[in-house]
Amino acid sequence: MTVGTLSSPRVIIVGGGPVGLGLAIDLGQRGVRCALIEKYESPQPIPKGQNLTQRTLEHFHFWGAEPALRAARTIPRDYGIGGMTAYGTLLSDYRHDWLQRELVRPFYFTDNERLPQYATEAVLRKRLSELSSVETLYGWSAESVTQDEDGVAVVLRGRGTGDTRQLQAEYVIGCDGSRSFVRDASGITQTKSDHDRLMVLLVFRSEGLHKLLERYPNKSFYNVLHPDLKGYWRFFGRVDLGTTWFFHAPVPMGTTKDNFDFRALLYEAVGAEFDVAFDHVGFWELRVATADRYRNGRVFVAGDAAHSHPPYGGYGINTGLEDAANLGWKLTAVLQGWAGPALLDSYDSERRPVFVSTARDFIEKAIESDRDFLAAYDPATDKAAFEAEWQARSSGARSEVQSFEPNYEGSPLVTGAHGRSPSAIGAHEFVARAGHHLAPYRMASGRDVYDELGTGFTLIDLGAVPEFVTKFKSAADACRVPLKIVTEPSDAAQSHYNASLILVRPDQFVAFSTNDASSDARDVLQRAIGNTG
């Protein structure tokens, strides 16, 4: 049965996980009419994508969903959400803190958070329901995607009903996971790095495990390194405090739900027996996959459709939500007419190198580093050497958090940093650097500069030459670029940012900063919106 064509949105988003929901909110809040297509009527109760960084919570702040997300947390705030790495078993004598994201807290406007992905999705669905500019179609799947010079068409089919609908729009974004239909239908290919490992995901209940791990207060996720696994992890995480857990680990190829002793695997990983009641047993293949481009004409991919990797370190959901923040303002700029279509090419040139670096320099590097360590050091053969290296790795775990600073240095949209390219490797600083995330600053009013940022571009005047500020305002008016000017003439602010004038993009990245007035304001602004031709 064909139901017909719905009212035309300007953007169709296929996939209603966190990335699709976040993108729909970002666009909807900016007044862009969207349709969100999601095959499941309700979020699926699999506890993945739990670690949310401070940067991700900034997105939730601007999407009007931060308080609700905090309230949905399943582990009490006073317990803590830190991580730990152990050698051999969870109960061994060798352990150190891991992924201490609180170390970089001063460089962000918000605290980090931890909760199951289905709880995050529920919060985002609720926020999306408040936006009249977004139409949601839950229980529908994309069946075909076609495009021409004028737009895209998506045929949908209702799950379990057979009903069909057709939507037409100017752009479509595939946020439909690692097996993305939109990506494949649009002809976007992938490059894969296959680790030839079958992994199991167990979700189980155990009060006994909680009691065993009470000796490690304020820890919510646990990484076990075992010599036999050659750098691949046995990974535990709390879903709530006291009862429910998830566990990832390598298992032999050919393992099924019925031919393997998963309870014994858990006992071996922990180093003790405890009560276990399984809620879910699933499998996934360990690989890194990257779309060879994030755009093909009017079709884009984001989140797992653009990049997928093992759930090591909580990088996936956070990277995907940054995709949404990057693409959202650029689509808005083009659809509202204050930037040309060339701006959309920068989505690929900024976001794809960042993921390639994330996979290479953090995820796969961690596997290789652990493999080399486990092969070279053994407390049973040389305890002193092992303990010295273990201590060194404890310090290295701190540097991983500090050096993970995704940035767009060398992007065609930012002024400065020539000869460089976007990367996940950086350094957290308060200095306002072109291509980097803006650090917070408490203003004389008591409010943070983040409280003053506009929905478009923001020009932060910390005591610049007045005529220079006026030139930016005139350039923005002439180009119809939304620009809010925040004035805070302060030596302390200039010292904090090492700049007297900062141009901030709608995604809170710095497009330009300076201490003089020699630059051409119009050229800077035109570059920031992709008009460099």
Image (cartoon, grey):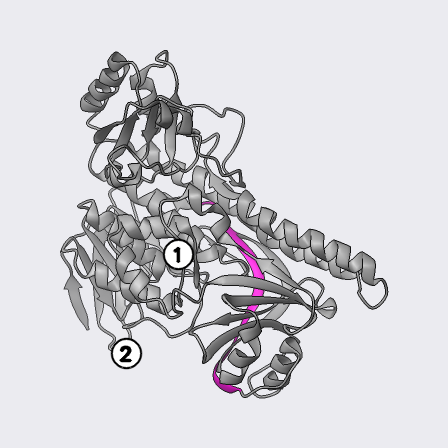
Camera-side residue of 62 and 523: 62
Identify the main secondary structure in magenta: strand
* Numbered disc 1: secondary structure: helix
Q: Which residue is drawn at 16% across and 68% down?
A: 3
Q: Name the residue under label 2.
A: 160
Q: Name the residue located 65 percent from the left edge and 54 percent from the top edge.
A: 394
Q: Residue 267, position in %: x, y?
A: 63, 82
Amino acid carrying mark 1 in the image: Ala
Q: Can residue 67 be seen in this view?
A: yes
Residue 456 x, y percent position in the rendering: 24, 36
133 with respect to 188 (left or right) = left
For the record, the magenta segment spans: 276-293
Q: How crowded is mark 2: few (under 14 residues within 10 Å), some or many (20 or more)?
A: few
Tell us which disc is closer to us: 1 or 2. Answer: 2
**First in sequence: mark 1 vs mark 2:** 2
For the residues labelled 1 and 2, the Cα–Cα distance comes to 22 Å
Mark 1: few, some, or many residues within 10 Å (few <14, many ≥20)? few
Of the pair 354 and 1, the residue shown nearer to us = 354
- Looking at the rendered structure, the kind of residue marked 2 is Gly
